[in-house]
Amino acid sequence: MKLNFHKNHRLLFGVVVSGFIILSLMIAVFPAMWVQEQNKPLPDSKPLTDLQRKGLNVFVDNGCMYCHTQQVRPIPQDKHFGRPSTPGDYARINRMDVWRQTPAVLGSERTGPDLTNIGKRQPSKTWQYMHLYQPRSVVKESIMPAFKWLFKVKDNPDSDDVVVPVPDGYAPKAGKVVATDRAKALVAYLLSLKQVPLPNKAASAQSQNKTSGGSGHSSGASASAKVNGANIFSSRCSSCHQSNGQGIKGTFPPLTGDPVVTADDPSKHIETVLNGAQGRTINGVTYTSPMPAFGEILSDEEVAAVINHERSSWGNDAPTITPEDVEKARNK
């Protein structure tokens, strides 16, 4: 039978559509299914809860991935976001249902910080709510839009409402800012983004602790000399404690004049940076927002550098420490 594509439009259309379907299956669908089947979750990872999965939907609905990717690259400027990402980091994010594909979380730009480890880098729910409502209330130079539609303003919040302590200048003229269910879900999802340890073989391949200042203990004066405490503070600490060390009133403590920071004995200061803190009373004010532990994230040199920056900045004048002091504190 002679095929005449010029006259038989049905035949032409059928061949084109069939070719499109076959190529789509070969190039996109089957490879994606294979990756989904072969890509197993990392051993210590946990599946998303119902609330966290709702938060993932809010994350996608609001286009968060357009600016925030969840992929850390193995390059120096990404180091403070966490270890380089692996396929196993995303294995828990599977298809929504038979009709909807796996949600995109890798993004196409790097306008905002990588979020793959944000649950460890910034574990404070309070900070996350403040940042969503008005980013500039916690990060003055932020260009992120405010997601105020995820919140309500109530004159008399209910007892079970999550009231956001928005600082003066950013708070509404009347009423209190209250998180909606969508805001709660989104924050729950963000806090679930925590990198887990890699299996031994992959971990050894990616380990750069000895040479690049990851978690662990690097040695040598040359490595210590390259560490800039001000840069570490800017990328790790300033979002809560602010670049001027003043913190945010009643929410995140100031480092200026903090008895722990200015003490002659630095042991409490080192312990706090290594292990984190929550619920401490400083100068008569109790701070309930948790401070993350940096012991697994920063090297001895980095911990010493950021502590020395805090102990010698904003009018503070306390004795400095060495990486050996940090190492001794780790081994207690």
Image (spheres, rainbow, N blue to C red):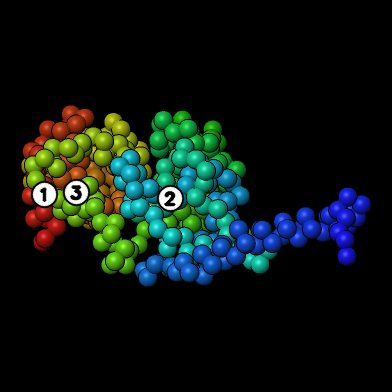
- Sequence-first disc among 3 and 2: 2
The single residue placed furthest to the front in the displayed view is: 2
Task: State the residue position of label 2.
Answer: 71
Q: Amino acid at mark 3?
A: Thr
Is residue 235 something that shows in the picture?
A: yes
**Quadrant into which the C terminus falls:** bottom left
Give the CA separation, mark 1 to mark 2: 29 Å
Percent from the top left, x then y, of residue 6?
A: 88, 50
Percent from the top left, x then y, of residue 267?
A: 11, 50
Q: Are marks 1 and 3 in contact (CB under 8 Å)?
A: no
**Which secondary structure, mark 3?**
helix
Percent from the top left, x then y, of residue 61?
A: 61, 50
Q: Amino acid at mark 1?
A: Ser
Residue 219 marker: 1
- Sequence-first disc among 1 and 2: 2
Is residue 166 something that shows in the picture?
A: no
**Which secondary structure, mark 1?**
loop
**Quadrant into which the N terminus falls:** bottom right
Percent from the top left, x then y, of residue 51?
A: 53, 62
Q: Is residue 332 above or below residue 265?
A: below
